Amino acid sequence: MKHFVNLKDVSSKDLRKILSDAKKRKKLRENLSTLEVDKGSPLKGKLLIQMFDKPSLRTRLSFHLAIKQLGGNTLTLRSNELHLGKGGESLEDTAKILSTYGDAFMLRTDSEYKIENFKKNLKIPLINGLSPNSHPSQALSDIFTIEEIKNKPISKLKIVWVGDSNNVLYSLIDISVKLKFELYLGCPKKFYPNKLVLNWATKNGGKIHIFDDPKKAVTDADVVISDKVISLNDKVNKKKKLKYFRFFKITEKLIKLAKNDCIFLHCLPRGAEVEEKVFLSKKSKVWQQALNRVHVQKSILLYCFDKLR
């Protein structure tokens, strides 16, 4: 049994195994319909329980399809439908029940406390579907998409993030250390990444280059990645925050500083951080990026069950 909570806790070798397996599985599904099961039904009889404290579209659908295509099944819960918290049942007791009824548990939450306590008390694999400081399945899928399109190892490409320091960025920092690629950030100084995150990266050989000028970050980029500046539960003065990012919008003018064959990625949903012309341009690979979540998450599930080929 293995958890999939933070990318920094997964070995480089296992991350490469997940990416390699996802590539093979995607190819083998070229002529299969959405709910046809993969050959061998590797997770036949397995139940993935999903719980959402926060709204979800891509994570919910992709994990649902992932377990189905592997021959298993899924049950989706919302925390406000359970005894957890307001109903008076402890997190520890909930973890014991989940461990009895299911074979794996995927949690999307706004609480690192919940992630760590479920990890401590579950007897089944825990998958982090998003938490305040981590979105590992998204970041790993982004790497898969980049290498698929560019047909090059990530270490040979200039990867640029423009925008806020959030959970997706933190997972990208984690995986940049694991897979040994340099990561360039364009971000207002007030919103630079947490020093603990940067110190961990530096201590472990990471190369993170931060600029408060997006032009300097994007110049000669192979890949530009962005995300919504104001997330759904962002408890800040939204108008004030947006002012800090007004010069960090992904515009046609900005993207021209990147290489001619540069691609643009965005984990969605989008906001004012990217121009419509860029988002809908040929450089934009956001739909391919979203679909790849299914393939990568299948391999994440197999990793958790020790069934990677």
Image (spheres, rainbow, N blue to C red):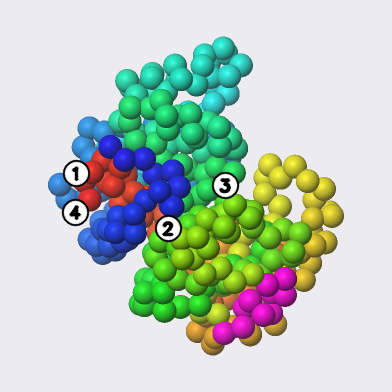
Q: Which residue is mark 3?
A: 133
The residue segment tinted magenta is 211-220
Most foreground residue, 62 or 140: 140
Query: Which of the two residues, 248 or 280, is positioned nearer the viewer here?
Result: 248
Q: CA distance from mark 4 to mark 2?
A: 18 Å
Say what secondary structure mark 1 lies in: loop
Task: Pick whichever, 33 or 48, lies toward us.
Answer: 48
Closer to the observer: label 2 or label 1? Answer: 2
Is the residue marked by circle 3 packed among few (<14), some (14-19), or many (20+) residues within 10 Å? some
The residue that label 1 is drawn on is 41
Q: Which numbered disc covers residue 140?
A: 2
Kind of residue sitting beneath label 4? Arg
> Mark 2 Cα within 10 Å, few/some/many (few <14, many 20+)?
many
Mark 1 or mark 3: which is in front? 3
Eye-nearest disc, 3 or 2: 3
Residue linked to disc 4: 309
Q: Spot the residue most to the left.
A: 40
Q: Are marks 4 and 3 in contact (CB under 8 Å)?
A: no
- How far, Cα to Cα, is label 1 from label 3? 34 Å
Tell which of 121 and 77 is nearer to you: 121
Residue 144 point in image, percent of width and height = 39, 64
